Amino acid sequence: MGMRQTDSWRRQGQRATKGEPLRTEKSGEWMTYRQAEEFSGLSRTTLWRLVSAGDVEAAKVGRAVRINRESLDAYMRRCSASSFAEV
C-alpha cells in the first residue's frame, strides 16, 4: 500500500545503499567519513588515523563525526607536493 520512507529517499537519490555510489555535494564544508572516502580515495581507517593525529580537522557532535573538506584537501595537497619534491 504505502511506500516506506527509506524507499522514497533511495528513489530521490538522497540516500545510497550498499553498492550504490554516494553522491557528494561539492559545496559542503563538512563531510561524513563515507563522503570523505569518495572525495579523497582514502580508506575509512586512514581517515580515522589522520583525524586522530590532528592532520585533518574534524568535528564530533554526539556520535556523528564530520570531516572538514578544506582541511582534507590541504592535507592531500601537502602530501602530493612532498611526494613530488622527493623525486
Image: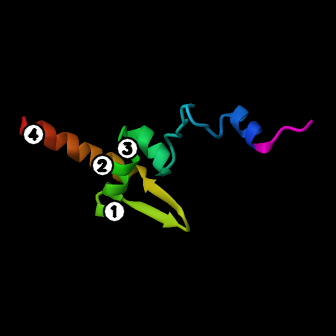
How many angstroms separate mark 3 from mark 2 (CA)?
Answer: 17 Å
Q: Where, quadrant-wise, is the C terminus in this rendering? A: top left
Q: Residue tagged by mark 1?
A: 52
Which amino acid type is shown beneath numbered disc 3? Answer: Ser
**Foreground disc of the pair 4, 1:** 1
Report the residue marked by disc 2.
74
First in sequence: mark 3 vs mark 2: 3
Report helix, strand or loop for mark 3: loop
Element on which disc 2 rests: helix
Q: Amino acid at mark 1?
A: Ser
Relative to 85, is 65 above or below? Answer: below
**Reading the chain from its start, which is encountered first: label 3 or label 1?**
3
Please say if the residues under marks 4 and 2 sit with CB atoms less than 8 Å apart. no
The chief SS type of the magenta part is loop
| Number of other residues with Cα within 10 Å of mark 1, as a class: few under 14, some 14 to 19, many 20 or more | few
Q: In the rendered structure, which amino acid carries the disc numbered 2?
A: Ala
Give the position of the N terminus as an image quadrant: top right
Outermost residue, right side: 1
Q: Give me the residue at 43% from left, 45% from top.
A: 36
Residue bearing mark 3: 43
Residue at the image position 48 percent from the left and 44 percent from the top = 35
In the displayed structure image, the side of residue 58 where residue 4 appears, left or right: right
- SS for dot 1: helix
Residue under label 4: 85
> Which x, y percent locates residue 19?
55, 31
- Span of residues in magenta: 1-5
Q: Which residue is pictured at 64% across the width and 40% down the height?
A: 15
Q: Disc 4, disc 1: CB below 8 Å?
A: no
